[in-house]
Amino acid sequence: MKAIGNSKNSTKIIDSNHIFKGSSVVEIVHKGAVYVMRITKDGKLILTK
């Protein structure tokens, strides 16, 4: 993971390979809600609730 910007407001860059680890679907919990992020056959990312 890499961070850019100053320490108060930095943007973190995470390689999608690190998140998916060989899978094409991951679930992300944000504020108690579950979101599904998937890689399409065209290689695009889709995030749904």
Image (tube, rainbow, N blue to C red):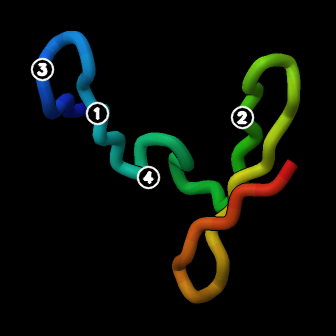
For badge 1, the amino acid type reads Thr
Q: Which residue is mark 4?
A: 16
Mark 3–mark 1 Cα distance, whole angstroms, equals: 9 Å
Give the mark nearer the N terminus: 1 vs 4. 1
Give the mark nearer the N terminus: 3 vs 1. 3
Give the mark nearer the N terminus: 2 vs 4. 4
Circle 2 residues within 10 Å: few <14, some 14–19, many ≥20: some
Q: Are marks 2 and 1 in contact (CB under 8 Å)?
A: no
Q: Which residue is mark 1?
A: 11
Mark 2–mark 3 Cα distance, whole angstroms, equals: 26 Å
Q: Secondary structure at mark 3?
A: loop
Disc sitting over residue 6 in the figure: 3
Q: Measured from the top left, where is residue 9 in percent x and y?
A: 26, 21
Q: Measured from the top left, where is residue 3 in percent x and y?
A: 20, 29
Which of label 2 and label 1 is nearer to you? 1
Which one is nearer the viewer's eye here, 19 or 6?
Answer: 6
Vertical relation: 42 (above or below) 45: below
Q: Which residue is mark 2?
A: 28
For badge 3, the amino acid type reads Asn
Q: Measured from the top left, where is residue 46 in percent x and y?
A: 68, 65
x 44%, y 52%: residue: 16
